[in-house]
Amino acid sequence: MTKPSWTGHGQTDIGPLRKENQDSLTVLDQIGVWCVADGMGGHKEGGIASHLATQSLEDLQRQQFTSIEQVTQAVKDTIHEVNQSLCAMSSSFYEQEVIGTTIVILIIHDRQAKVLWVGDSRLYRMRDLAFELMTEDHTQFQELANQGVLEMTNSDHPSNHMLTRALGASTYCEIEELDIELGDSDVFMMCSDGLSNIISQLDMAKIIYYSEDKHRAVANLINMSIAKQATDNVTALIVDKEGV
């Protein structure tokens, strides 16, 4: 198999305040799949949940795909299997207490791209000078904002941290998806809410734009989060077209 032109680089950090890192990521350049997962803080075994999600996706590297539809279906099947495993785990060991994780996945095949997500881990796209949030958080705050009850500027509202969807929260997992038409200059940044809650979208854009490459950009994003005393684990993953 020839090496694809889209490649990713990610980094995760425990952050200055947490005792364990419940974030996880995976970079599968060979099949065009990249993922960030964030174990649900305050719940038992969040780290196990996020690692189960990312490691399960790694098994897809053994398969051959000829279309983005095939990759997407395989990823969805994997997500549903992980969800069922987490639900069974919580039922068996923790008397129905949730073992859960959020997840965001970018899939690129030929000239097509798709984003799949559950929860509030995010994906942003930089195209030329425009930096845009492509996903919508599955939180009570986002639902209230969509209904006009809250303003988006009121992001410190307590409901901003209350998830309405997560892997492991219910035996039925609704995966949201978005198709993206690729541009040669596109740069994608995926992150856990430990990063997006502490760094503004404008600062993210500046870091990505002015960093010399995605490796330095990821390091700069993590370092800024830590310097700002991030209260959670912090994960960033950048995917761009090699050589652009």
Image (cartoon, rainbow, N blue to C red):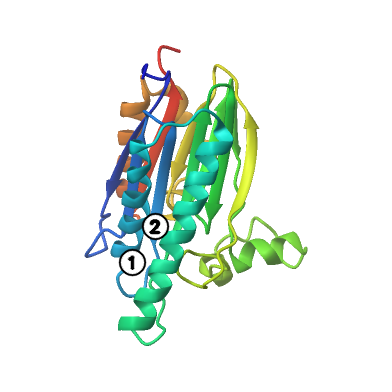
- In the image, residue 162 sits, relative to residue 65, either above or below, namely below
Asked if the residue under mark 2 is in contact with the one under mark 1, i.e. CB atoms within 8 Å, the reply is yes
- Name the kind of residue labelled 1 in the image: Gly
User: In the rendering, at what x and y percent does residue 229 appear?
Assistant: 32, 54
Q: Which residue is mark 2?
A: 38
Give the mark nearer the N terminus: 1 vs 2: 2
* Residue nearest the observer in this picture, 128 or 202: 128
Distance between the alpha carbons at the discs numbered 1 and 2: 8 Å
- Decide: few, some or many residues near mark 1? Use Cα within 10 Å; few <14, some 14-19, many ≥20: many
Q: Which residue is mark 1?
A: 46
- In the image, residue 216 sits, relative to residue 51, either above or below, namely above
* Residue nearest the observer in this picture, 155 or 182: 182
Residue at disc 2, secondary structure = strand
* The furthest residue to the right: 148
- Name the kind of residue labelled 2 in the image: Asp
User: In the rendering, at what x and y percent does residue 6 appear?
Assistant: 44, 23
* The furthest residue to the left: 19
Q: Residue at x 56, y 69 (%)?
A: 172
Count of picture labels = 2
Specify the quadrant of the image occupied by residue 159.
bottom right
Q: Residue at x 53, y 57 (%)?
A: 118
- Decide: few, some or many residues near mark 2? Use Cα within 10 Å; few <14, some 14-19, many ≥20: many
Q: Quadrant of the C terminus?
A: top left
Can residue 67 be seen here? The reply is yes
* Residue nearest the observer in this picture, 57 or 149: 57
Res. 12 mark: none
Q: Residue at x 26, y 63 (%)?
A: 18
- In the image, residue 225 sits, relative to residue 83, either above or below, namely above
Q: Is residue 6 left or right of residue 185?
A: left
